Amino acid sequence: MKRLSELSAGQKGIIDSFEKDDIFIKLMEMGCVPGEKVKVEQIAPLGDPISICVSGYRLSLRLSEANSIFVTEDLS
């Protein structure tokens, strides 16, 4: 299992769980729910923020937010 922040641009994953902090409710409201497929679209030149595709739309996340999401790599 990896953190979403560890994926490179173009890699896909399936959201598995969240680290226990205050941000997970906010992330779930934005469509980042366990079992949802996610793809890293772009990473800013300095690494923060990252752009992901989840639930059919693009979402920008701070690296600290992406670091709190655990994913399993989607090989499809």
Image: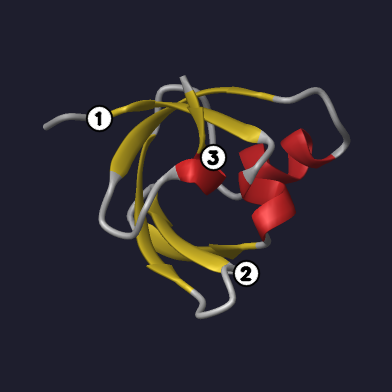
For discs 2 and 3, the disc positioned in front in the rendered view? 2
Q: Write the residue at 17% across / 29% down.
A: 75
Q: Amino acid at mark 1?
A: Asp
Q: Is residue 52 above or below residue 21?
A: below
Query: Mark 2, residues whose alpha carbon is within 10 Å: few (<14), some, or many (≥20)?
Result: some
The circle on residue 10 is none
- Asked whether, in this view, residue 23 is left or right of residue 41, the answer is right
For disc 3, the neighbor class at 10 Å (few under 14, some 14 to 19, many from 20) is many
Relative to 20, residue 28 above or below: below
Circle 2 or circle 1, nearest the eye: 2
Front-lying residue, 17 or 1: 1
Q: Secondary structure at mark 1?
A: loop
Do tag 2 and tag 3 residues touch (Cβ < 8 Å)? no
Which residue is at the far right? 22
* Residue 74, numbered circle: 1
Q: Earlier in the sequence, mark 3 or mark 1?
A: 3
- Judge by depth and name the residue closer to the eye, 54 or 18: 18
Kindly state the secondary structure of the residue where label 2 is placed.
Answer: loop
Residue denoted by label 3: 32
